Amino acid sequence: MSRLTAIQRFIAEHTATLEPLQRALALAHWEAATTGSAEASAQAARLEIALRQLYADPTAYAQVRAWYEAEAAADDPLTARQLTLLYLEYTGGQQDPATIEALTALEKEVRDEYTTYRARLHGRPVSDNTLDQILAHETDSTRLQEAWEASKQIGQRVADRVRELARRRNAAARRQGFRDHFQKSLRLAEIAEDRLFALLATLEAETAAPFRAAKEALDARLAARFGVTPADLRPWHYGDRFFQNPPPASTLDLDPLFAERDLVALAVRTFDGLGFDVRPVLMRSDLYARPGKNQHAFCTDIDRRGDVRILCNLEPTARWLETLLHELGHAVYDRAIDPNLPYLLRTPAHLITTEAVALLLGRLVLQPDWLTAVAGVDRSWVAAQRAALAAQERLSRLIFLRWAMVVVHFERALYADPDQDLNRRWWDLVERFQLVRRPEGRDAPDWAAKIHLALHPVYYQNYLLGELLASQLAAVLRQRVGRLVDAPAVGAYLTAALFRPGARADWETTVCQATGQPLTPLYLVQECCALSSA
């Protein structure tokens, strides 16, 4: 038997085990997220252990590594890419049984907390949506502070366990020769850490002046709204639990436009105009809040055979409409991947590419063409607000970019030393990148209120790089198609260039093939810097 045949046989046997296991795990996670069921959560943990044990097999790893290092599949590109992905998975999975069981149990505990806990405000449980509405629309500073502090209660409940997760992840990574879990995760995600932080430094420098100018203008408006001086503004004045989005009233409040609208109908109409039918996704999805349900939003591909679902907690607001379009962006990507590809390649090329598409489509809410053609907003109103819409879009981009820098830098620090004063480090970074003053005398694990740091470790750079790629894709689409709304050619291009190829190639090759150039910050920086002249 040739080496290539042996590799292909190994992949076939591995896939026969992996595919039903991943499907069962996805269904268990879905049940746990939608119901808060303890039984479903326990089943998900058992299946997670089984999946981790599959990739922990040292004999299989040794064989895969030998083939990979010998470039034994070089003559067959599809087999070679599958072998690379297997090598990365097996490398990431080399943990002893005790570590696997301990990590899985701890992650289950933390996931259950994030799913089922409801903050308490004035002695009563309140949902994240309720807190978001208070932060967005309340004008009394005391009430705002109370709601903001309530939004951080989950951090107190999970912080010690998140630190322990970081310690255990680090220990596993160091046994394999990595500096820490942060380095290991980036390397296995095919992201060069030195290039990532060089890019972050460039983005920090390029956006510093436009962000400072935008922030000063925003502070002046917020100070007037709340009857305080700009120096008195604190985190609870910025309309968002983490200031990762602009306050609704910062330049233009779109929420009244959607207060009586059917967000799902608007989403269907949006994707119809791009040539995508999202109805099959929505039929399987869980879209509205209820007790015990996960309060966040995500998209999940259950089986890589078309069963794609999204979870949301919709309210009639612009933010939730953007989130709905974002999650459906992930969904149309998953569903358009070539079904004839091998199972291991029936995924997006990378988290960066799927986040880019989701971000690109979520941005439509602020597009004048979308507001008139899809949402049916009066053309004269949209025309009068065109400059304000452009300013809001650029402000959104700047605010999210600076926020993402906080998370990525913090996460590197978290894994460098989980036992340091993380509460202080968090606010040092918030003040540096977001220019938001820390509350006086506060010493609390506000960082642990961000679910990604606990359950989606070393993920946030995918959002940041996805923003770059979204702007790069938008530039290509405007050049090729001319518009991003009611344009089936947009869907055709994305399908051919990004979706259908799946994971045939690594993400950098995929970006070059799809856009004609490597990933560049040029387009995003141009959008951000235009704010100062808007």
Image (cartoon, helix red, strand yellow):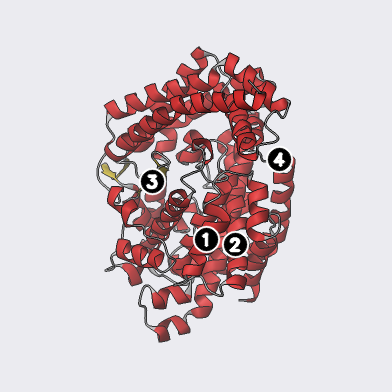
Residue where numbered disc 4 is placed: 192
Residue type, numbered disc 2: Leu
Residue where numbered disc 3 is placed: 306
Of badges 2 and 3, the one in the foreground is: 3
Please state the horizontal and vertical placement of residue 288, each as a whole percent of the image.
28, 51
Residue type, numbered disc 4: Ala
Earlier residue among tags 1 and 3: 3
Which residue is at 47% across, 31% downward? 159
Crowd band around label 1 with a 10 angstrom C-alpha radius: few (<14), some (14–19), many (20+): many
Separation of marks 3 and 4 at Cα, in angstroms: 33 Å
Earlier residue among tags 2 and 3: 3
Separation of marks 4 and 1 at Cα, in angstroms: 24 Å
Which residue is at 38% across, 35% downward? 26
Q: Is 43 situated above or below 424?
A: above
Residue type, numbered disc 3: Gly
For the N terminus, the image quarter is top right
Earlier residue among tags 2 and 1: 1
Please state the horizontal and vertical placement of residue 522, each as a whole percent of the image.
70, 62
Residue projecting furthest to the bottom: 380
For the C terminus, the image quarter is bottom right
Which residue is at 33% across, 68% downward? 258
Please state the horizontal and vertical placement of residue 263, each as a whole percent of the image.
32, 63
Crowd band around label 2 with a 10 angstrom C-alpha radius: few (<14), some (14–19), many (20+): many
Separation of marks 2 and 4 at Cα, in angstroms: 22 Å
Please state the horizontal and vertical placement of residue 16, each as a whole percent of the image.
45, 27
Crowd band around label 3 with a 10 angstrom C-alpha radius: few (<14), some (14–19), many (20+): some
Residue where numbered disc 1 is placed: 360
Local secondary structure at mark 4: loop
Separation of marks 1 and 3 at Cα, in angstroms: 22 Å
Separation of marks 2 and 1 at Cα, in angstroms: 8 Å
Residue where numbered disc 2 is placed: 473
